[in-house]
Structures are given as structure tokens and as C-alpha cells.
Amino acid sequence: MPFLELETNLPAGRLPPGLAQDLCAAAADILGKPAERVNVTVRSGLPMVLSGSGEPCAQLAVSSIGVVGSAEQNQRHSARFFDFLTAQLGLGTERIVIRFYPLEPWQIGKNRTVMTFL
């Protein structure tokens, strides 16, 4: 069950229509998880500074069980997420940062329990 949180200082009007749904589909493909399990939040127009500059930028946080737990996995994921984000947001790679967080099943609650028991 991946969770993606995209934050940017770009105004909402500069984001492509359907960005959240497109990021969901891209994440499902990149992480090898069904789209029905992917959760995406997009926050735009935020006051942000990246590498000391307030120029347009974005941060993507990717949390998931079992698919973001190694440098090798995240190197592959990073390349593909950067391709998606640069194309969709019109930002250079130097204005995007991605953070990967491995999760354990007991850290995600769903249907009145945790994923461990589902």
C-alpha cells in the first residue's frame, strides 16, 4: 500500500489536469503495486525553499511496504519518478528531491486493524 505525497511551490493552475491520478498510475507501474492500493496527495502553492532557493521546486515522499527498502530499489525508482516529475511539472532534476520511506505492515491501519492482519 504505497503512499505518495507531492509538495510543490508551483501554483495549482500550473499543474497539469489529472496530476494526482497520473501520479497514481505511474507509481503503480514503478513500484509494481496495483493502482487500487496506491494513495496520492498533491499539495501546491506551498512556501518552499530547496537548496537555498525559492525558485519553482517539488518534493516527493514515497512510503511503501517491501519495495523501497534498499538503495538498489530506490535508485531504479528514483530515475523513473524523476522522468515522470520533470515531464509533468516542467522542472529540472536539480529542483526536485525524492524521499523514500520503507514501511512495515503494522504501521498502516485499515478496516479497523493493521495491514499485518489483512
Image: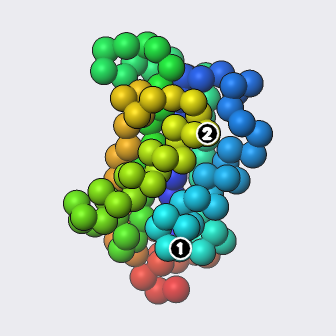
Q: Position of residue 4 (x, y in %)?
A: 51, 52
Residue labelled with disc 1: 33
Q: Which of the colour schemes (rainbow, by chain, secondary structure, one colour) is used?
A: rainbow
Residue 75, image quadrant: bottom left
Of discs 1 and 2, which sits in the foreground?
A: 2
The structure residue drawn at horizontal position 70% and vertical position 53%, both measured from the top left corner, is 21
Q: Residue at x 45, y 54 (%)?
A: 80
**Left or right relative to 21: residue 71:** left
- Most extreme residue toward the bottom is 117
Residue 92 shows in the view: yes
Q: Residue at x 47, y 67 (%)?
A: 31
Q: Nearer the viewer, residue 105 or 24?
A: 24
Which one is nearer the viewer's eye here, 2 or 95?
95
Q: Where does the image place residue 90, in percent across and percent down from the top left?
A: 57, 30
48 or 98: which is nearer to us? 98
At label 1, the amino acid type is Lys
Separation of marks 1 and 2 at Cα, in angstroms: 21 Å
**What numbered label is drawn on residue 88?**
2
Left or right: 70 in relation to 24: left
Q: Residue at x 66, y 71 (%)?
A: 36
Image height of 66 relative to 87, above or below: below
Total marks shown come to 2
Please indicate, yes or no, whether residue 39 appears anywhere in the rendered image: no
Disc 2 marks a residue whose amino acid type is Gln
Would you call the spot at circle 2 few (<14 residues within 10 Å), some (14-19), or many (20 or more)? some
- Left or right of residue 18: residue 24: left
